[in-house]
Image (cartoon, rainbow, N blue to C red):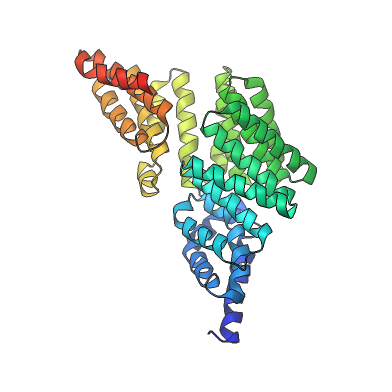
Amino acid sequence: MPNDHFLRSVLANLGYWDGLVHPFRDPGYAELEYEFPNIVRATEIGLTFPATRAKAGVLVTHCFDLVELGHLWDLWLPHLRRAIEVPEIELGLKGQLINQLGYFLMHRRDLEAASNAHRTAIALGEQVRDLMIIGDGWFGLANIGYHQHDYAQAVSFGEQAADIFLELQKPKHLSNAYNVLGLLAHATGNYPIALNYFSQAVDLRRQTESPLRLAMFLQNQAFTEQSTGQNEAALVTLAEAETILQANHNPGQLVNLRLTLGAIHFAMGAYATAEEVFKKIDTGFLRRNNMRTWLAMVYNNLGNVYLKQGLRDEAETSLLQAAAHWRKTAEEIQLANTLGDLAEAQALQGRVKEAMPNYDEALIH
């Protein structure tokens, strides 16, 4: 058994790291990401001893923003799962941890397991009468519904989450709920509603020290502005988001911004500019972090640019890469779209026989 002096040093170490990550401030993100291995080590030690597990569990919950913004969930999930299982974690904290598990599983596109986690958290929240756990669970289910294209049910979940966050006066959480409701409205073509939600999400985030989330919501707003033909407004909105990201190190979010910026230039017919933007995306970062969905999007978008430019060989090469990455995700609709474009690239080269299986598979999906 460790002596009391050692346990006090473990608790002090946990307290030190907890003081740095909570409350989380985006401007300190880069420094915290550099220290992430030390935070992981402190958590591992803290979860080892019964006397330090409760404090380690609190540190785990407070690392959520750092892990999500840094796309560090693959490294973090084993420690999060371990924290959920230790008996010293009280039920309210366990509910928070299970919701966080759901979010990270969603990012990995393990949507069924993510849904199960959020429903378990909601049940725990009801048991301990904790509205925040329940609201976070509904918010998680809204995000999953968005990715599953089950938009009507997702809207219901998102509205329930927003009502709870509004009642509890939680502006950061409320802005997140408005953002997902904006995404759902955009997906169903309700662009004025989407812009209203994004505007509210952006306004709430401007009131907090959350520039990275603000940049994310601005990107979503820009994409909807472009969809309504407001191309110049979209570029202005994206310019603000890019300025934020340049001042706050976050390579994952910069990838997302360039995907949006390239898509807008593509929609405007500025294919050379779109190609230049897509080529700036750090695919090495995406590979190192196993981000298959974004890799597929990069190669799919480049393939479509090349099709528009009449570069059929280059289009086929990019679209083949995109299809290979889509096959490692659950995005069947996106795979079908890529296969249709790939078949078009092959048919334009007079290779109709090779194109037909891709057309056929696209129809199946």
> Quick check: 282 left or right of 11?
left
x and y percent of residue 230 in the render?
59, 19
Which of 140 and 286 lies nearest the eye of the viewer? 140
Residue under the image location 53 percent in, 44 percent down: 114
x and y percent of residue 5 in the render?
59, 86
Residue under the image location 43 percent in, 20 percent down: 270
x and y percent of residue 344 in the render?
30, 16
The C terminus: image quadrant = top left
Which of 309 and 246 lies nearest the eye of the viewer? 309
Figure quadrant of residue 353: top left
Residue under the image location 56 percent in, 32 percent down: 146
Q: Taking the image as drawn, is residue 247 in sight?
A: no
Residue under the image location 66 percent in, 21 percent down: 192
Figure quadrant of residue 63: bottom right
Q: Taking the image as drawn, is residue 41 in sight?
A: yes
Q: Is residue 139 above or below residue 76?
A: above
x and y percent of residue 317 in the render?
26, 28
> Quick check: 224 left or right of 70?
right
Which of 90 and 204 lies nearest the eye of the viewer? 90
